[in-house]
Image (cartoon, rainbow, N blue to C red):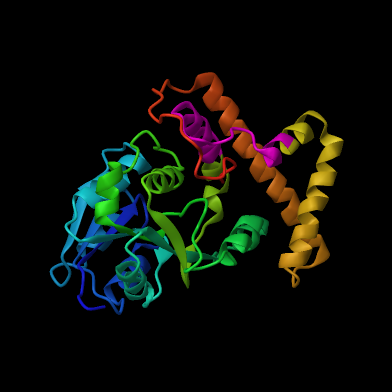
Amino acid sequence: MAMNPEVSAVVLTRNSSRSIVKCLDSIIHSEYKVKEIIVVDGASTDGTLDLIESYRPTQDIKVVSDQLKGLGFARDIGWRSSTGAYIIFIDSDVVIDRELIGDSLVIMERDRTLGGISGKLDPKCDETGLISLWMEKNVAISYHKSVDSYPSLEKESLHTGATTFRRSALEAVGGFDHEMALALEDWTISYRLRRQGYTLAYIDILCSHLETSERFSRINIRYGKARTICQRKGYPIVLFPLRLKLTFLCIVAPPLALMLIMHYYMIHRRINKRLSAINRLLLGTIEVWRLALRISGIVFELLFGRHVEKSIKPMDDILSPSSK
């Protein structure tokens, strides 16, 4: 790089004491030094803020509150509280690779069409049990780690767990959608960036995602609810893509579930060859359970969800309508 652009790191936390030290250490010890660290906290009560405070006075870490308004607001207030020309969002349970920031900037400085570039997430779960195994080996993350990297461009969306955005791109699209409070704030910002003419990409660098089985049910129900909100706002997302339709059929006709479980069994046989046959079968069952939880979130939001105004005007879709 001819110049050294300033980078702000934005970290979202909420009761993140198990991982926040590893996360912050990975930022501080990155080969490319960030200008500032902004922590957006969601009213943590488990000692997270005390751990952050322990970094002072050697590190200047600014803490702001997300006012319990959810992910969209938290990411938005985070980057608006920063001053860097680039903003890297890092979830508090993610440990970034030392080269991620610098290598991402090299690409983004060279390719000015890029609005954002993400590191790939590599789940790590210290717990035992099938859900923990699924967290590390599930179909979605296996495909995610094998997705094409830059110069190939991402046609769907980026996550926001370890992603660098160009500040001018966020300004151009008006930042994150505050109504995407539960999930899919990453999908919607990706859609709006691409609609504005920016490109997106992954960089071939793995960052550790310190997963926990405790969030399995909660996060999948939230994704289901978020799909409904996303569609109501006018984003081009299919509420019930094929995999959810098939899962719904399994719910109303349970014998069909075995066929879907075997479908996932065969996928795991191909992508996770070291797993035993029984574990492939059990992980296939969890894959179907995950989809059923998402359906429950969709149905709950359809029946009891709050009203949101449609704010995205129709246009030719630039993203695949299936999404996550």
Foreground of the two, 267 or 14: 267
Residue extent of the magenta highlight:
221-245
Q: Image check: 96 left or right of 286?
A: left
Foreground of the two, 127 or 67: 67
- Residue 295's quadrant in the figure? top right
Residue 42: tell me if it is visible: no
Residue at the spot x=33%, y=36% of the render? Answer: 178
Query: What x and y, as percent, mark residue 177?
Result: 35, 38
Query: What x and y, as percent, mark residue 277?
Result: 82, 64
Query: What x and y, as percent, mark residue 229?
Result: 47, 30
Foreground of the two, 127 or 218: 218
Q: Quadrant of the N terminus?
A: bottom left
Residue at the spot x=43%, y=42% of the render? Answer: 188
Q: Main secondary structure of the magenta part?
A: helix
Q: Is residue 78 above or below residue 119?
A: above
Q: Image check: 273 left or right of 108?
A: right
Q: Is residue 243 above or below residue 78?
A: above
- Residue 176's quadrant in the figure? top left
Residue 16 located within the stretch drawn in magenta: no
Residue at the spot x=57%, y=48% of the render? Answer: 216
Residue 244 located within the stretch drawn in magenta: yes
Residue at the spot x=32%, y=75% of the render? Answer: 102
- Residue 280's quadrant in the figure? bottom right
Residue 309: tell me if it is visible: yes
